[in-house]
Image (spheres, helix red, strand yellow):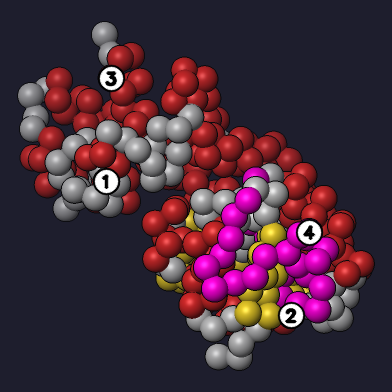
Amino acid sequence: MTKSSIAFIGLGNMGAPMAANLVKAGHAVTGFDLSDIAIEGGAMASSAVEAVEGKDVVITMLPAGKHVVSVYEEIAPHLKDGALVIDCSTIDVESAKRAHEIAGKAGALSADAPVSGGIMGAQNGTLAFMAGGSAAALDAAEPVLEPMAGRVVRCGGATAGQAAKACNNMILAVTMIGTVEAFNLGRKLGLDDQALFDVVANASGQSWSTTTYCPVPGPVPTSPANNDYKPGFAASLMLKDLNLAQEAAGSANAATPLGEHARDLYARFVEAGNGDVDFSGIIKMLENDDG
């Protein structure tokens, strides 16, 4: 694999381990973050502009669309000719479209490549990337993403990665709520959690929410349910993604009644002070809703 000079902007819980895996793969990585943080084996810049100057690749991992657009506007005049810009943030489709436009006007290739897999996936280099962009951009992006990835899925043109992420996480929220309701019902009907798990894991009700991330303690030892629902994937982040999905559904005139209801339930869960609880911890709220 060709080694690249990479600027990595946004070194939070996800970005820092992602950047570290690029360093381990032999890339020359320069990071920038507003907080005082360092990349082991990498360099740090004093500004986003300093970070991107002369770099082959720029990767951003930022909280929201407004931050991505702002950074792109700031760095665009300073990008190396023909640079590749990859945004791995989870943001709204309109902001992703604007980011592609800014990069294109600057003569850069661009890809939107949000991720799934959480902090553990970032640390282990097993993230799933949902990538959108031109064929040329995705051809260039795949070898850069590989050290951070379990899989890179080409979803289509510009903004397709963000669209896929919104749809995937809406499914995840809906299936988790359904799984929680089923285990609550099973308990009230006298079923043991393990017995219900053994049935569902091998029957038509099977889903990732059951077999990998079971919301009750016991059946899946690695699930947050066995660690007092410490994330994992925080409920506040799930709510963010569900809001993005509803925004996209509104702009596309798509009916998503279950997605909307899931958003409302997670909003109530977060508003009750559970933003830092794993999203599977919504079982506690729904248990309390039982008569």
Q: Tell whether label 2 touches label 3 (CB within 8 Å).
A: no
Q: Residue at x 88, y 75 (%)?
A: 107
For numbered disc 2, what is the local secondary structure? loop
Residue assigned mark 4: 47
User: Tag 4 or tag 1, which sits nearer the N-term?
Assistant: 4
Badge nearest the viewer, 3 or 1:
1
User: Tag 4 or tag 2, which sits nearer the N-term?
Assistant: 4
Badge nearest the viewer, 1 or 2:
2
Identify the magenta region. Answer: 36-63
Q: Amino acid at mark 3?
A: Glu
Q: Amino acid at mark 1?
A: Ser
Classify residue 283 by image quadrant.
Answer: top left
Badge nearest the viewer, 1 or 4:
4
Q: Tell whether label 4 touches label 2 (CB within 8 Å).
A: no
Residue assigned mark 3: 287
Find residue 12 and report its horizontal and vertical position in percent.
57, 51
Q: Tell whether label 1 touches label 3 (CB within 8 Å).
A: no
Badge nearest the viewer, 2 or 4:
4
Q: Is residue 45 magenta?
A: yes
Residue assigned mark 1: 223
User: Tag 3 or tag 4, which sits nearer the N-term?
Assistant: 4
Q: Amino acid at mark 4?
A: Ser
Q: What is the distance, in whole Å, between disc 1 and disc 2 at their CAs?
A: 39 Å
Q: Residues within 10 Å of mark 1 (few under 14, many from 20)?
A: many
Find residue 51 and report its horizontal and vertical position in percent.
75, 67
For numbered disc 1, what is the local secondary structure? loop
Find residue 78 and report its horizontal and vertical position in percent.
88, 69
